[in-house]
Amino acid sequence: MPPKIGTLQIYVAEGRNLPNRDFFGKQDPFLEFTLGNISKRTRVDKKGGCNPKWKEDVFLDVPQGVQNLAMKCCDRDVSSNDDIGSSSIDLFRIFEEEEVHSWYKMQRKGKFAGEIYLEFTYTPTVSNPLRRHA
């Protein structure tokens, strides 16, 4: 395992315009974040439908050499989880600025699959050479 270079806090606020993958009723979406070989999930927003709200923090240790965060949104079902959409987020700007808030678009099979609003806070374990100084 590469050494840890910092901690990434992700405030997962909400989603909008997610396609409905449930045939009956509203879908129950959750997000899974993968950084290197570590994955963390949000809670399931029961009946969150196409515009879920999570309003929770996810914390990930950032290993050296990892530059992309994988985000996957799924609908929680009894038998299996249905894929709603996914995105790969380049962390360079987040490492550089240390605080970034934005909507992140997802895709599924090359098509738009909604957006997720995330607030990132990166805390380096050592002095951050990428940090811009005013």
Image (spheres, rainbow, N blue to C red):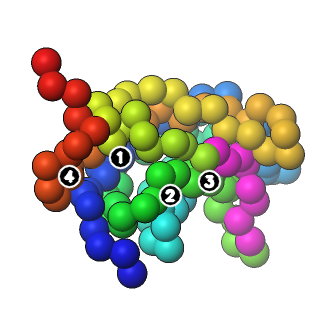
Q: CA separation, marks 3 and 4?
A: 25 Å
Crowd tier of the residue under label 4, counting other residues whose Cα lies within 10 Å: few below 14, some 14–19, many 20 or above:
some
Q: For the point 86% across and 46% down, which residue is it?
A: 109
Q: Give the mark nearest the N terminus, 3 or 2.
A: 2
Q: CA distance from mark 3 to mark 2?
A: 7 Å
Callout 1 secondary element: strand
- Identify whether 54 is placed above or below 113: below
Q: Which residue is mark 2?
A: 33
Q: Is residue 27 visible?
A: no
Q: Nearer the viewer, mark 2 or mark 4?
A: 4
Where's residue 68, x and y in %?
Answer: 52, 51
Q: Main SS of the magenta segment?
A: strand
Q: CA distance from mark 1 to mark 3?
A: 14 Å
Distance CA(mark 1)–CA(mark 4): 14 Å
Of the residues under marks 3 and 4, which one precedes in the sequence?
A: 3
Rate crowding at label 2 as few (under 14), some (14 to 19) or many (20 or more) other CA atoms within 10 Å. Answer: many
Please give the name of the residue rendered at 84% of the width and 39% of the height, measured from the top-left corner: 110
Where's the C terminus, which quadrant?
top left
Residue on which disc 1 sits: 10
Question: What residue sits right under mark 4 in the picture?
Answer: 124
